[in-house]
Each structure stands twice: as structure tokens, then as C-alpha cells.
Amino acid sequence: MSLIQLDNVAVHFPQDTLFEGLSWQILPKDRYGLVGPNGSGKTTILRLITGEIEPSEGTIRRVKQLTAGYLPQEGVIEEERTLFDAAYSALPDLPALQSEIEELQQKLTREGSREDILERLGALEHRWQALEGYSAESRVARVLSGLGFRKEDHERPVATFSGGWQMRVALAKLLLKEPDVLLLDEPTNHLDLPTLDWLEEYLTEFRGALVIVSHDRAFLDRMVTSIAEIDRGHLRKYVGSYSDFERGRDERREKLRQHAERLATERKRIERFIERFRYKNTKARQVQSRVRLLKKLEQVEEETEARQIHFRFPPAPHSGRVVLEVNNLSKSYDGKEVLREIDLVLERGQKVALVGVNGAGKSTFCRMITGTEPPDSGEAKLGYKVDLDYFAQEADFHLTGGQSVLDELAESATVSQVPDLRKMLGAFLFSGEDVFKPVDVLSGGEKSRLALVKMLLRPSNFIILDEPTNHLDISSKDVLLSALKSFAGTLLIVSHDRYFLDRLVDRVLELDDGRLKDWPGNFGEYLKRKALFQEKKKEETRAPQKSPAKTGGRKSKEQRRIEAEKRNRYSQERRQIQTEMDKLTQTIEQMESRKSELEVQLGDEETYHKGEQARDIVQEYERIQSELPELYERWERLEEQREAIEKAVRS
């Protein structure tokens, strides 16, 4: 039996039809990814399912007493309740049950042991136990912790949290509600990587139906078993992950294209025959036959690609080898240390990811590098002839406002660029009259795309991007990814999109507890090594350890002198280890780069006709293959030593 049934549903607007004849059945265990280009109607379908809006035509049937949980992209209402109370209120039946139990207990205190009260109280407590009410508070705490909230946040009013954190509150309430069908519209937009991992594990155990709108490929691949695609007003369904859907869609489009070409060739052949013999009486019968055949030839409507953002960054001017040097950089807010003694060197041509939990200081670090915010101590220096461009999360940072989209762009353009501005805006999905819209009324996503257009107008050799993909659909992300891969300059990118990062970066920097950890290799390798490292730390934690003896009282002058010497010694050891790690990182990157070059040569059939040279290439490749694991292992041992030293300093 289906939970929800959409039959021939249509949504009409005064000057447009969003879709019509749309039918869809959602069963109790279905796990759908709902995909399609921006503006195709994905959010509208979710709102139709919940009953927020009604269709222009058709019917929507829902099973009786259906519970649906809907997480919108934005517009979550602030609450005056505390975080914990707001989350607890979402538990089905429990808040009302608890309130009635407390009222009856107070009655017993006032009026004595009345039989009717005792009987009702017993029934309620039995229901309370059946709903696992005694573990409800720990369940709420577990979900809040998984979504990144700290215990000290529990008593904060929800209204005091930022918009991104309020979306997490709304998500927590939905998960605790455990509805029959869960509808999530871009749930990963405000989540960092650890929270995303936790959410995936939680949703894997979810027993209801799941419909997800997301532009995160990796998330869809892990969460869904079917895809529903909206394409030019029609809904098509596919079995499999998003990757399966993409492969199948590309194959189908290619077959349709080939079929359309064959029909076009046949149509031209028939038309030539008709034109040639139209006025010959001896061929009149054959001509009429061909005319009838031409009318019968089917018209094949090829599936068209969604409109995409097409662009390339301007050529990067040549810079010095060192693009950025950060020395002993620190920053605190309200007494809380966000960045602590950060050291970093970026070199020309590197593509680097900056990751960490929300609040770790990633955006702060980017602002320090760009000079838009000063550090408390230390410095960040750009290298020789480095031309920096910065894309901030807040699109308003790049826009002046108070004018139209076209005027906003023209303000930053050179005379030679002005004729191409309309074409550039069209590539970023600002078509027709959209270019005359006031910047101030644009949505967050539109402002983000406009800010990216402005980046195209000036050449740079060092680009910092802070969450550039948040407002792009999957096809737009692909085009941006392609452009960034071909960018010859240096790139530092903050993003939680695993698919995007895995195909782009060759180095990962992780901000953790104010410190910067340097992980060589691509993003997938970083995730694997980090998982191994965390598992090793868990094993060490589980092992029995002797508690150090506690001492009290003031420290003597001699004790302070000994501790100072200890800190100095540890500081020297830490610098030595960091120096060796930096050298190792550079060696690993060079070998990875050389390995990629050799793989290209080994994939070329001509290589194997070069005799001695081919043998040298194979031998060099095998040597690198055998040496790289040893270098990685050595780097990880140094990282463990550095962690141990920092732990000893703190103890």
C-alpha cells in the first residue's frame, strides 16, 4: 500500500506551467532522491506532498493519519524555547504524556490516593514505558550531539542561534519525530563533514520512507535506492543510486541522439527524392508514396541538458614559487582561542582544501589571509607578484547593491569586456529580463552566482573560495569543477562537498582545536588516513592507563624552572618534527605528481614501442609505487609524535 499517491498532478502559474500529468507513488520503504535543474519544481513537489499547497489539477491521496516531516531549505521560525525543550517537544506523544502524568501526581499529593487517579496514572505510566520515555532525554541529547550541539547549548533559547544552526534544530526535531515519510530539501547545506557522517549513519537506520532533494552526489549515493528526475515538466523514475542514474541517463541520451540522427538522414533522403521527381508524371506514384512516408516518420524529442554555467577563469599571471606564508598566526574572540600559532606555506599551482567542523575558524582564517580581518598575533604574507581573489560565503561581501544585475557587473568591467557582459550573465542563468533585476531583491543563490561572475572579470593567480558550491545545482558544480581543475594558479577552497573536493585538491588542511594539520594527498586519501588515525586513538583510549598522582599547593620556583625547560625542549622537538613533516609533504606531492605523469605515459600504446625508455618508465613507476606507502607511514608516525608532544605540553 502506498503512503502517498500523486495522480496526473499539474501546477499552473499565470504565465507558465511548472509541470502537468505528473504521477508518483511513494511506498513505506522507498528511499528517493528527487533531482532536476534549479526551478524545475522539486521544492513544489515536496510542498504538495505535505499539503502546504494544492495542485492546479489532479489528485493527491495520503494514507490516514500519515505523519510527514518536512525540512525546507530556509525560513525556519525562531523559537523562544530552549534548545533541549524544543527538541524534546518533537518526540511523538511523550511531552503530552509527561505533562498529564505530572498533573496526576500533583493531584494525588493534594487529594490523596483516589482509585480513578491511580488507575489513570498506571495506564499512562504503562504507555510511557512502552514509548521508552525513561530514555527519551538521552535520545534527545544523542541527536543534538550528533548534529554538532554542545551540552552547554541545551539551555540556550533557539532564537539565539544563527540561521544555519536553527536549520539543525529543525532537523533534530524531524529526526526525533520519526515520521512515516521524511522530506529533506537540501539538508547538507549547513552541515560540516563530521555532522554529515553522523546524519548518514542515522538515516541509514531510519525505517520510514525518505525523499531527499540534494545537490550533494556523495550524500545521494549513500542514502537513496531510487531517483525521481523532473525533466521539462515530466517525472521519470530510475532504480539505483545517483551515479547509476547518471550513467543510465547519459546512455539513454546518446541512444536518442543517434536515433534522431538516423531519422534526420532518412528524412533528408526522402525530401531529396520528392524534390527531384515532384514534377515527373512517371514518378507521381512514387512521390506520393514518399510524401505519405515522410508524414509517418516520428519526431524524436531529444533530452536536453539542463542550462549550465559555462566559464573559464582568465589566465593566471605568473607568481613566485611561494604564494602564501603564514607565521605563528593566532586569533581569539571573547577570550576563546580560535586559531593558535598557525604556520603554513602554499606554493604556486597547489590546489588545497581547508576543512574542519563548523566554528573551527575556516572563514576566519580566510579573512586573515585576505587582510579583511587582522590577527591577534603573527602574520600572513602573500608571495612575489601574487594577485589574490576571494569568494566569501556572504555574497553581499562582493556586491555593492542599489543597482541592477547588469550595472553591478558593468561597474567592475573593462571597456573591452562590456560587450560580453550579457553573454556572461546568461551563462550564469541570468537570462532575458533577469539582468535588469535589482541586486537587492536577488535570492542568496542568485547573489552567489553573480559574485562568481564578478570573479571572472579580473585575472588572478591565487583564488580563495569559501563554500562556493552552496547555491549551485549538480550540473553547475560540474562546470565549476572543470574550470577550477584547468585553473593554472593556486587554489584554497573551503567546502563540505566530498565529491567536489575529491576530484579537485591535492592537499588537505584541517583546522582542529585551533591547530592546523597538514594531510598530503587527495581528499579521499585524507578521509581514509583520518579514519585509521581516529581508530588508533580509540584503541589507545580503551587501553587501561595509570592515573598520574595529583599534587596540590603552589608550585615552587624550582618546579616552574623545570616546567619551563620542559616546554622549551618540547617546542624544539615539535619544530624539528614539523620541519621534517613539511619536507615529507613536499616529497610526497612531487612523487604523486610524477606518478600521475607516468600513468599517462603507461596508458599510451606508443610508450611500449620505445624499448629501453619503456623499461625505465615501468621501473620508475614501480619504485614510486613501493616508496609512497613508506613515506605515508613515516608521515603518520611523525604526526603521532607531534600529537604526543602537544599532549605532554598540555599535561
Image (cartoon, rainbow, N blue to C red):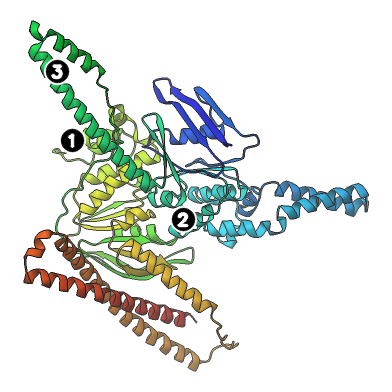
Residue position for label 2: 196
Q: Position of residue 351 (x, y in %)?
A: 26, 60
Decide: is 111 above or below 74: below
- In the picture, measured across the screen, residue 270 lies left or right of residue 630, that is left
Mark 3 secondary-structure assignment:
helix
Q: Which residue is mark 3?
A: 271
In the image, is 64 to the left or to the right of 629? right
Residue at 89% x, 52% y: name it.
108
Q: Residues within 10 Å of mark 1 (few under 14, many from 20)?
A: few
- The answer for how far apart the CA atoms under marks 2 and 3 are is 59 Å
Give how far across and how far down residue 638 sits, in percent: 35, 79
Q: Nearer the viewer, residue 443 or 305?
A: 305
Q: Where 534 falls versus 141 (above or below)?
A: below
Q: Earlier in the sequence, mark 2 or mark 1?
A: 2
Give the residue drawn at x 73%, y 46%: 96
Give the residue type that dot 2 points to.
Leu
Query: In screen coordinates, is 532 left or right of 490?
Result: right
Task: Compute the Cα span from label 3 to label 1.
Answer: 40 Å
State left or right for residue 192 relative to residue 314: right
Q: CA distance from mark 2 to mark 1?
A: 40 Å
Kind of residue at badge 1: Asp
Amino acid type of disc 3? Answer: Glu
Classify 10 Å Cα crowding around label 2: few (below 14), some (14-19), many (20 and above). Answer: many
Q: Nearer the viewer, residue 63 or 522?
A: 63
Q: Earlier in the sequence, mark 3 or mark 1?
A: 3
| Label placed on residue 420 | 1
Dot 3 alpha-carbon crowd within 10 angstroms: few under 14, some 14 to 19, many 20 or more: some
> Which quadrant: the N terminus?
top right
- Please identify, in this view, whether the residue under mark 3 or under mark 1 is nearer the observer: 3
Q: Residue at x 25, y 76 (%)?
A: 627
Q: Nearer the viewer, residue 425 or 121?
A: 121
Quarter where residue 644 is shown: bottom left
